[in-house]
Image (cartoon, rainbow, N blue to C red):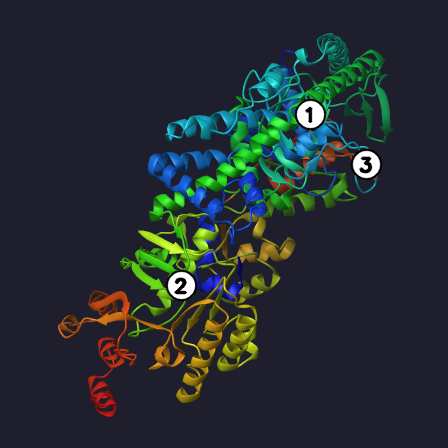
Amino acid sequence: MIVDAATAERIGLDWLRAALAPVGAFGRRHDEQVAPYGPGDEDAARAEIVRVVAAAASLDPHGVARVRAALRAVPEPTPIVARARVGDPLGDVDFYELGRLVDALDAFARAWDGAGGAPEGRPPRLDALRAVLAPGRAQAGFYLADAFGAGLRAARQAYAIAQADLERRQAALAAEVRAICGVDAVGEEFVVLRDAYAGPLPAGVHVVRETPTYRLVSLALIAPERDAALTALSEEEERARRALAERVAAHAEPIAAATRALGALDRFLARVAFAQRWSGCVPEFGADVAFDQATFAPLAEALAARGRRYTPLSLALANVAVLTGPNMGGKSAALATTGFLAACVALGAPPPARSLRLPLFAQIAWVGGDGPAERARLLSSYAAEVVRAREVLGVAGPRALVLIDEFARTTGPREGKALLIAFLEAVRARGAFALCATHFDAIAEAAGVAHLRIAGVRDELLTSIDARDLDAALDAINAAMDYRVVAAHESRAASDALALAALLGVDPALVARARELYGP
Amino acid sequence: MSSSTFTSAAESLYALATSAARSVVVVGTAKNAGKTTTCNALRAIAYRRGVPVALTSIGRDGEPADALDGEAKPRVRLAAGTLVALAAGVVPRTPALEILETGASGALGATVFARAVLPTVCEIAGPPTAGAMRATIDRLCALGAGPVLVDGAIDRVAALAGGDDAVIVATGAASGTTVARVAAAAADVVARLTIPGRDPVNERARVVLLAGALDARDAEALLADAAGATVVVEDPTRIAIRGALLARVRAVVDLRCERPLRVVACTTSPVGRETTLAPRALVEAVARATGLPTFDVVADLVA
């Protein structure tokens, strides 16, 4: 599905992608490899959405949140396993991270069961890898335990004995230094002041530097046995790590399968959470667009944040239609909702509607408004719109959805209206689906397309409104507005602009004068 | 001198620093001023007392040789049982450490919390950000029973301001070519790091809150316009003026900080790469100049 940045912003696609974003690295990687559904993918899209809707109904939403939190905590094993497979040395931190992966998968499985997930949907556990790492995982951490190498225990014992012997010799020498020189030699190097002690130093103490007032001396003892034991220990530990890395590499495929499953589950759960939040439906695929009680979720969320209620929309679009209606009646929202629902289906998310029928689109394009910000700075509003319309016509085809929001409103009304009619005729000729919001009169008839309108302001409510401030006025308009999309039988595009201006606090005398000028 | 009554400089310093703090941060007045030597001395005393310590670093310490001049540097020694927080990229391979958990990630990998099972030497690269240092110290405290020793850096110690950490200022021949110069440099650092915290009861009528650093231009403005006022900076490391200018500002305004540091002592190192200073004269001069108990853990001197 091709959607440019300006359209993505208008139809809430950016918001939708964020809402459906996986929480973990696996899910993000999985998402990058999955293309949106397009024409021909109907069965796959439907199958995914059916699964999501079923899971949304059966899983506990709090449990889903906990499972997603558990997903976020799963460490990334892919680079470690890749290194193990090519024979690169692994370190103890790598083995620790693999242990964390095993634990995280177990925690994840528990969270999945706690959320009521079906056993067949639970991601695989890595019990065999757990067994491989078990000797080093007495606690939650990791230690290259003696059991990982046949010679490790002996090498460690030899090193410990040699090191202890060295420390004993150092302690004895330090005690001698303390007794003879009066200095507590806590480090390898220390200073013997000449005014405190100027006599001969104990055997084993080496002078590093001499000055008129002191001697800097060292207790560093030669310890060939300890050094040899350390070298032997190093060889044993590296041998054990190599062997352990080979065993890890043997589990590369189960680990990769687990991460793939987690990635797919991450994507799936993002959609489940979305469906639980917005009550999505399973769409039907057909040759027209029709939805009932649909929610443009980004707007609903923004309204909810301001304590306002969103009114769901219903609409039917056979191919190309003009949508008229009052200002503030939701024409642009209807366009955005249409695009948003199509985007939901393309991304495998249940569209937030009671029902939806549509084709899968190859392209969604928005025409109207300023267009891309950079272009808006370079071109006039009209020029930007026209250039945009030209581009959309260049690519619009039978599987395109074109959403046209008050196109040509920035030029003279006669020419603008003519241009809009011609544009709609061209869109229709290309077989594209299009919904066009406008305040121009008689566009639908002239272009030979359907005419829909927002039902509009309920006059009986409008006259009873006594708005004290802007918030109250907006509440009142919301209450008075009938947001239903209905078939229009008149050619005139009523806008209720003057009544709304009065409600929004414009000077009553000014509004009265406007009514006078407007006529009956 | 009887060994039963003998209390060395390192022992006295350890007792002072750990008496009222879970963590001890050693900062240096210059590169190679003796931070790691001081940390190693504190660790040695803890080991002698059978106290398990934890180690970490603000920055990178304990590498075999100085990255700039290639000179040998003191290694960080871990006794068995020592806890350490270090970057994954510098975890020693032999003898193996017990990996306990991992934390914030930086250029050298995640911060690894580990325990030495056998004695070893290692390099320590601490948490990637100043902000992560507080969390690292807290985590080390939670994982272990003993004090946390931090090989620190003055320019990154701000993250610890406002805590109860004990700060030790390490100075020595690396800071100057004469005893007087080293003492003056130490006094300058200590004067900045010991700027007291706010005292609401005795605060002046006018309080000036300074966002960011207190630099020379701010100082001139304060001297011209804020005489007698209480001037508050975020923490002592925000004070970018020093010497006579800092002294003048402190004489004219009541300089305070929101999050003070608790500097408890200085250490001196008479041995520099190219200079050696008289140990006793140095330790006494630094003690006089800073007004802090001062220890030379190499020459075993206290002043």
Q: Residues within 10 Å of mark 1 (few under 14, many from 20)?
A: some
Task: Kindly check if marks 3 and 1 are in contact, taking CB atoms under 8 A apart as contact.
Answer: no
Provide residue A57's location: percent of width, then percent of height. Answer: 33, 38
Front position in the image: A210 or A110: A110
Tell me the kind of residue under disc 1: Ala
Task: Using the rendered image of the protein, determine whether residue B9 is visible from the camera's viewpoint.
Answer: no
Provide residue A236's location: percent of width, then percent of height. Answer: 76, 15
Q: Quadrant of the C terminus of chain A?
A: bottom left
Closer to us: mark 2 or mark 3? 2
Give the residue number, with chain letter if any, for mark 2: A336
Chain ID of residue with mark 3: B
Q: Quadrant of residue A517?
A: bottom left
Task: Say which residue appears at 69% left-offset and 32% top-offset.
Answer: A82
Compared with A240, B218 (above or below) is: below
Q: Which mark is residue B276?
A: 3
C-alpha span from label 3 to label 1? 56 Å
C-alpha span from label 2 to label 1? 50 Å
A90 horizontally vs A479: left or right: right
Provide residue A422's location: percent of width, then percent of height. Answer: 46, 81
Chain ID of residue with mark 1: A
Q: Residues within 10 Å of mark 3 (few under 14, many from 20)?
A: many
- Identify the element where label 1 is drawn: helix
Task: Say which residue appears at 37% left-offset and 55% top-offset.
Answer: A357
Do the dots labelled 2 and 1 sit on one chain?
yes
Give the residue number, with chain letter if any, for mark 1: A249
Tell me the kind of residue under disc 2: Ala
Q: Quadrant of residue A78?
A: top right
Tell me the kind of residue under disc 3: Thr
